[in-house]
Each structure stands twice: as structure tokens, then as C-alpha cells.
Amino acid sequence: MGEDDNGLRKTIGYSNKFWKNKSQKGMTDEQKLQEFHKDEHAARYGAKTSKYKRGSAELGWKIVARTDLKGEKRYRWGSLKDLHPPNLANPLTCKIPSLIDFLDTRQPKYFFYTLKNWDFEKEKDLPVETNILYKALLYWRLMLFTGDLDEKQQKIVKYYLDTSNKIITARMPMSDFWPYGDGLVHYYYYKKKDTYKDRNKEPNFISFNPECPYIFFNYFNEIRARLSSYAREIEEEKILKNKEKYWIKIFKTIFEKTEIPNQVTLKTNFNYQNLDLVVSSYIAWSHNKLKPNKKEPQIQIFATWKSIYSIFKELEVLKESSSDLFDVEEIAVEKVDYESTLGAPVYTVWTKKNFDL
């Protein structure tokens, strides 16, 4: 920012009066930035300095959002720019105007408006825009995991994620089943088809999510991998009571107290004959703990080690015949430095704490 440095002036294509005629002595970085943008704005648009309004020229020009806000819901911290994910690139298209407004203005309210009008059934036709939505949500989650946010910032990011979740949940097209996070689903009032596969199905039952079978399949294998090293020590044991005693001890050793059932459940609802049945027993107990959606029919469906094991074996067969159903598209997000990514910071209420993200 020295007077002899013409690099920035050459970049913007004209000589900014601030660098020539104004002394920088005693000015903070924030004041320097404000003065620079004030003169840059005046040079571009001929605006008088006396009419300059802070905020209209923070980027050197005024960004006009395309989204009509008339009648739209107002969100808390919806205009705050401090926690905008810096890993998002503008797709240079205007297929979703509200999404472009989110990227241009860095205001999360436009992200929520995008979700409100998102067509989930046609998102495959918008791979670039869909990827941006995923990356924004993932980066906000990453912000919480890294622990770099202060208490108020954490509260705001959690609000952004909760709000997104509520909008998505309310707008996603309903299937004929109720999905759970472990990859299992609940079917209610199921109408049997005239097939061999459906011959023994009850009207209400548990199965894997047909739209993403890999979730439960991978979850089962993760639990099995966690327990496999301990299984080798007991696989030669023939007495079931000894196996039960051994596995209960293992559960209490490697799992947190909140991650294991009580002693009665461990003794009555678990099958300790082999590793797969132990895993099935654990997943059944874990699934039965999950709270159903408030709109879900008030019909109790319980998972058992037998039903979970049957679902897993069905998925093994499915993976052999249709391996493409288990392909997962991974989206990675990385923690980045705000200042190096975005250049000179746009100062807002919280100033420099934001640039540690």
C-alpha cells in the first residue's frame, strides 16, 4: 500500500486519488480500505464523496440482487456476510437467480430462498448448482467441527444448518417409506406385489433405503470393522455363555456409556453366535433408539438382530448384481484462509475474528 506501488492502480485501470493525494499515516487498515473503495467508487460512477454510503461500495461497485424479496420470509442473520463459505465458485450461469445472489452478495438468506424453490426431482439436470448447495452445507458443518468459531458464531452456523434442514425436510418429495440416518427405512401400509420377493412381507416393516442402499451397507461394515479384531479372540469358543460374557465386556470397553444398551438388553436381545449377528444385534438396538418423524404413522416397528441380518445379506446379493447402486459421489471441502482466498477483507460487525476460519 505504499505510494510508490502502482500494482493495484494498474490492476483497476486508473489512478486512484487516494494513493496519490492522501496521507496514510495514522490510519488503520480498515480506514485505508474504506478510503480506497470510496475513491474507487467515485472514479467508476462519478459519485460525489459526500454522497458515498458505506456498504454500497465495499467491493468497488454495487451488487443488485435479482431475487424479489416481496412476501418472502425474513431469516435471522440472513444478511450477515461473515460466515459465507469461501469454497464456492460462481458457475457464471443464471439458471438459479437466488443462488447467484447468494454467491454475489454472500448473504445466506438467498441460500434459503434457493432451497425453498429447489426442484429436487430435477436436480440431476443442475449438477453444478447442486454441487454448490452441497459444498455450502458441508463447509458450515466443517466450521463447527474445526472449533475455530466463538460461541456466537457457532450459534449462527447451527441456525443456518437447522434452517436448511427444516426447509429441505418440508420440501423433499415424499416416498412410500420413512428414511432414517442409519440407512434403514420404515414401510407402512405396504401393498404386496405379486412377486416371490413380496410373498412374506408384512404391511409394516423395516428395510434398507432403496434410493441409497450403500448407507446401511457401509454402516454395517463400519461396525463390523470396529469389532473384527476382538472377534478373532473368541471365534474358537463353543460355549455361548462365555461368548456373551466376552462381548459384553468388549462393548463396555470400546464404546461410550451412552453407546451401549443396559445389561438386561445385552443379555436378552443380543445374539453372540458370530460377529455378523453381534453387529446385527447392536444395530437393531441402536435403530430402535432413534426418534421417528412427527408425521410418521404412530405404528411401532421394532428392529431385531434377525431382521437386520436378513437386510444385510440381501444387500450383499444386491451388490453382486447391481454394484453401480453402491457407487458414492464424494464431495470434499477444505478449511481455507479467508484473507488469502478472498483478498482484502470486507469489514463487518465482527471484524478480524472472521479471518481465522
Image (cartoon, rainbow, N blue to C red):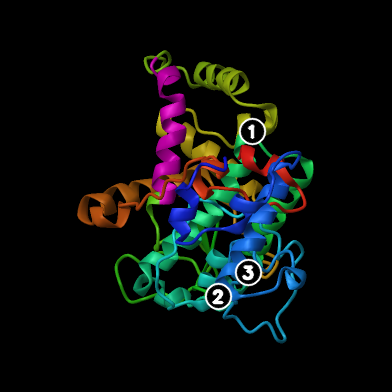
The correct choice, above or below, for 174 with respect to 334 in the image is below
- As drawn, the label of residue 98 is 2
- Asked whether disc 2 touches disc 1, contact meaning CB atoms under 8 Å apart, the reply is no
Q: Residue furthest left?
A: 321
- As drawn, the label of residue 259 is 1
Q: CA distance from mark 2 to mark 3?
A: 29 Å
Q: Which residues are magenta?
A: 215-232
Regarding residue 111, the answer to whether it shows in the image is no
Q: What is the x, y in percent for residue 39?
A: 64, 62
5 magenta-colored: no
The correct choice, above or below, for 174 with respect to 271 in the image is below
Task: Give the residue type at disc 1.
Answer: Glu
Task: Give the residue type at disc 2.
Answer: Ser
The correct choice, above or below, for 69 with respect to 329 in the image is below
* Left or right: 136 in relation to 216: right
Mark nearest the camera among 2 and 1 is 2
Q: Nearer the viewer, residue 354 or 326?
A: 354
Q: CA distance from mark 3 to mark 1?
A: 62 Å
Mark nearest the camera among 2 and 3 is 3
228 magenta-colored: yes
Q: Residues within 10 Å of mark 2 (few under 14, many from 20)?
A: many
Q: Which residue is mark 3?
A: 42
Element under disc 2: helix
